[in-house]
Amino acid sequence: MSIFKGMEYCDSCFLMLDLDPDTEGKEGQIIGYIHDPDEVVYVAENLKDLIFSIIREIKDLERSCLWKKYKLHKSGYRNTKK
């Protein structure tokens, strides 16, 4: 397995580009490694799909009720709850 480690979170979760998957995978797929307990999970078919998935999640958040409590301000997020 040839893997390019990409993003890391808290020294225990990694997103990786799989350049040499096993017979069930596809070259270029994105997999995630989670430590404690050790687990490898399928994330996306390729980098493009991962990026579009993130964009969809952000748009869904913007439309959600939770997002309405916050507004994007020049200085960052500002809680609008009074």
Image (spheres, rainbow, N blue to C red):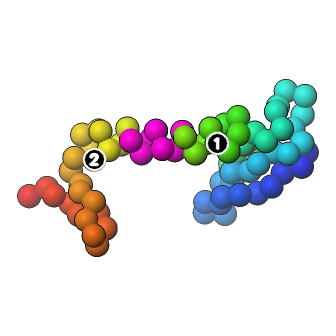
Q: Is residue 81 above or below residue 26?
A: below
Quadrant of the rendered image containing residue 74: bottom left
Residue 49 pos. (x, y %): 62, 38
SS for tag 2? Answer: helix
Which segment did they paint magenta? 53-59
For the question of whether residue 37 can be seen, the reply is: no
For the question of whether residue 4 can be seen, the reply is: yes
What's the magenta bit mostly, secondary-structure-wise?
helix
Residue type at the position of mark 1: Lys
Residue type at the position of mark 2: Trp
Between 75 and 66, the one nearer to me in the picture: 75
Q: Is residue 56 magenta?
A: yes
Between 31 and 28, the one nearer to me in the picture: 28
Residue 25 pos. (x, y %): 82, 31
Q: Which residue is mark 1?
A: 48
Q: Are marks 2 and 1 in contact (CB under 8 Å)?
A: no
Quadrant of the rendered image containing residue 27: top right
Mark 1 closeness class: few <14, some 14–19, many ≥20 residues within 10 Å:
few
Q: Which residue is mark 2?
A: 67
